[in-house]
Amino acid sequence: MTDMHWLFEQVAAPDETARAAAVARQNELTKPPGSLGRLETIATDFAAWQGDAKPELARIGLAVFAADHGVAARGVSAFPQAVTAQMVANFAAGGAAVAVLAREAGAEMTVVNLGTVAPTDTVPGVLNHHLGPGTADFTQASAMDRATLADALSTGAAQVDAGLSLFIGGEMGIANTTSAAAVFAALAGLDGAATVGRGTGVDDAGLANKQAAVDAGLARHGARWQDAPPPEAALAALECVGGFEIAALTGAFVAAAQRGVPVLVDGFISSVAALAAVRLNPGVADWLMFGHRSAEAGHARVLDALGATPILDLDMRLGEGSGAMTAVATIRAALAVHAKMATFTDAGVANSA
Ligand SMILES: Cc1cc2ncn([C@H]3O[C@H](COP(=O)(O)O)[C@@H](O)[C@H]3O)c2cc1C
Ligand SMILES: O=C(O)c1cccnc1
């Protein structure tokens, strides 16, 4: 499956009539105008996405995409590569942080393994779509070829059910903060020093090593995206220095927007995938909400590049979709007050003079 034309198919604009009706309702609720702050804009954004002045969070979908990274051979993670497949089993068994949070939030979780060094074929509850034992080390070769990238993008897209009221993408892949930093550097014209963080917790020497790995990848592959138009630059960056799970997230985000499903973006890695999705198809930007600001150095810069203000800032730096899943409670609160508060007329409360 190498056809990528679907990526460029149109994304509908959110419904501005429904947004205006929701804004009008907010102004009739028994509170000073604007006093619920971001809870108000969260509710009015959902109204525009659902085409309904009283939106509801009926079905939340979480897809956790996992894959291994050849660049792990450069010693860029504090953990061994075997952890990726072990965590895939932990997601499926319900013991990973995001699995617990998804249960609490009432979300439907799927776990997709796109290619790890250790197979997970016999693990119950895992969807295996094996593209290889992980990417190649991008300091030595292209992370993947174009056909594999196309497969990863459409595998991500296939996880987004058009009936969802919200989609969250999670990821697991030892060394993927290095790959995500390289993709971000490629898309934003930055270097390793500006994009790399400590990930699972590398020390100062490890951090310098990660920066060197990113810079080596940029030096090796930079000609592939430097003068390319944004969509081709995004594809080249994902292909040369990305990861199977990062590409799957990108494909899922594009497909969600095309299907009218809003996306709640997680941390550093997911936000880099969201930036790639927006470069591929700018209309995607209208369907993104950001769950949290990760403590991973570099996330704030990605958020700036996207013009995004996330809901939460809790010093989390886990990935998996955990920050986004934690923000679901805030969205539920926003939609509940929007739908259930009394209006000034209902309650007989005097409105402003
Ligand atoms: C037990 C464990 C669970 C995780 N869940 C998410 N990550 C996170 O850490 C990894 C990225 O960090 P780095 O680039 O430093 O390897 C990704 O798998 C990410 O999802 C985890 C990492 C570990 C060790
Ligand atoms: O913000 C993230 O997505 C993140 C940060 C550190 C490690 N893994 C993921």
Image (tube, helix red, strand yellow):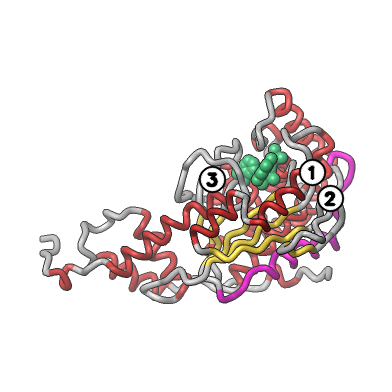
Classify mark 3 as within 8 Å of ligand 2 or not, answering yes or no.
no
Mark-to-mark CA distance, 2 and 3: 37 Å
As drawn, the residue found furthest toward the right would be: 140
Q: Is residue 115 left or right of residue 176?
A: right
Q: Is residue 141 rendered magenta in the image?
A: yes
Residue where numbered disc 2 is placed: 118
Work out whether residue 106 or residue 334 is closer to the camera in this orientation and state it.
106
Q: Position of residue 46 (x, y in %)?
A: 44, 67
Bin the neighbour count of mark 2 within 10 Å (Cα to Cα): few under 14, some 14-19, many 20 and up: some
- Which residue is at 69% across, 50% downward? 172
Q: Secondary structure at mark 2?
A: loop
- Identify the magenta region: 138-163
Q: Quadrant of residue 91?
A: bottom right
Q: Secondary structure at mark 1?
A: helix
Q: Position of residue 282 (x, y in %)?
A: 61, 62
Is residue 283 visible from the viewing direction of this image?
Answer: no
- Which residue is at 84% across, 50% downward? 118
The residue type indicated by label 1 comes to: Ala
Q: Nearer the viewer, mark 1 or mark 3?
A: 1
Bin the neighbour count of mark 1 within 10 Å (Cα to Cα): few under 14, some 14-19, many 20 and up: some
